[in-house]
């Protein structure tokens, strides 16, 4: 139902499943992702915490809990949850990406760069990662490196409009070679 855009019906199905089985971790997780996608970060966080009470090493739940906290503006809490996700699964590309974007929001571009490097190493076919990584490099004035990342994003997804625009901007700012 959720994939068909029937959000309210999907939420009700998850709630009914939880009435029958309050410890059904997958229903808590799915309801949490649905609520988060609807901007209901507080309610989503409750669902992810319910999962973690049953599955305390669930990296995905820590990652989504971090996302919910970030939406609420609790950046320190979000960072702690993303890092918890990485302790549970050091190869969690999504947690590396979320930490990267969080560090970028805080102006910590060195840490953002390191996390983006980990994310693209773990998820090398994700054009959005390369585009965002290129953006961080461009913010640091590393325009040639940024252009390379935008080009990689476009090799993966030739229709990636933002990567194409970012590449054009980066190239326009590069010194001209005579």
Image (cartoon, grey):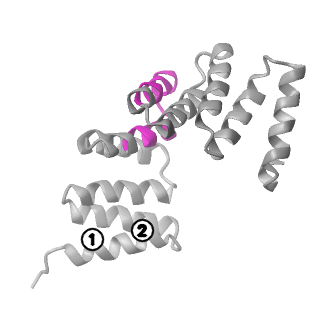
Tell whether 28 sits left or right of 170. right
Circle on res. 123: none
Mark before the other along the chain sequence, 1 or 2: 2
User: What kind of element bears circle 1?
Assistant: helix
Image side of residue 49 versus residue 148, left or right:
right
Distance from label 1 to label 2 (Cα)? 10 Å
Residue at image point 54% right, 35% down:
68
Residue that protrudes farthest toward the left in the picture: 178
Above or below: residue 25 compared with residue 134: above
Residue at 62%, 19% in the rendered image: 52
Name the magenta segment's main secondary structure.
Answer: helix
Q: What's the residue at 78%, 55% (across, down)? A: 5
Count residues near mark 1 (Cα–Cα under 10 Å), then give few for <14, some for 14-19, many for 20+: many
Which residues make up the magenta segment?
79-100
Res 64 → quadrant: top right
Q: Is residue 49 left or right of residue 165?
A: right
Q: Nearer the viewer, residue 83 or 10?
A: 10
Q: Secondary structure at mark 2?
A: helix
**Does residue 31 appear left or right of residue 123 in this picture?**
right
For disc 2, the neighbor class at 10 Å (few under 14, some 14 to 19, many from 20) is many
Q: Percent from the top left, x then y, of residue 85?
A: 50, 27
Please state which of residues 5 and 171 is positioned toward the viewer in this rendering: 5
Q: In the rendered image, which quarter contains the C terminus?
A: bottom left
The disc at residue 163 is 2
Query: Horizontal and vertical percent for residue 31?
Result: 73, 35
Q: Which residue is mark 1?
A: 170
């Amino acid at each position: 139902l959720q994939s068909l855009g029937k959000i309210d019906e999907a939420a009700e199905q998850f709630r009914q499943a939880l009435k029958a089985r309050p410890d059904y971790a997958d229903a808590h997780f799915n309801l949490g992702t649905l609520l988060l996608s609807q901007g209901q970060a507080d309610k989503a966080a409750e669902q992810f915490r319910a999962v973690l009470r049953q599955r305390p090493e669930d990296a995905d739940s820590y990652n989504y809990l971090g996302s919910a906290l970030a939406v609420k503006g609790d950046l320190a809490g979000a960072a702690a949850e993303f890092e918890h996700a990485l302790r549970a699964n050091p190869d969690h590309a999504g947690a590396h990406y979320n930490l990267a974007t969080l560090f970028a929001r805080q102006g910590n571009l060195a840490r953002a760069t390191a996390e983006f490097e980990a994310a693209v190493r773990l998820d090398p076919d994700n054009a959005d990662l390369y585009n965002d990584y290129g953006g961080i490099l461009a913010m640091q004035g590393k325009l040639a490196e940024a252009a390379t990342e935008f080009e990689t994003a476009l090799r993966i997804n030739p229709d990636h409009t933002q990567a194409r625009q970012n590449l054009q901007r980066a190239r326009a700012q590069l010194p001209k070679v005579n």
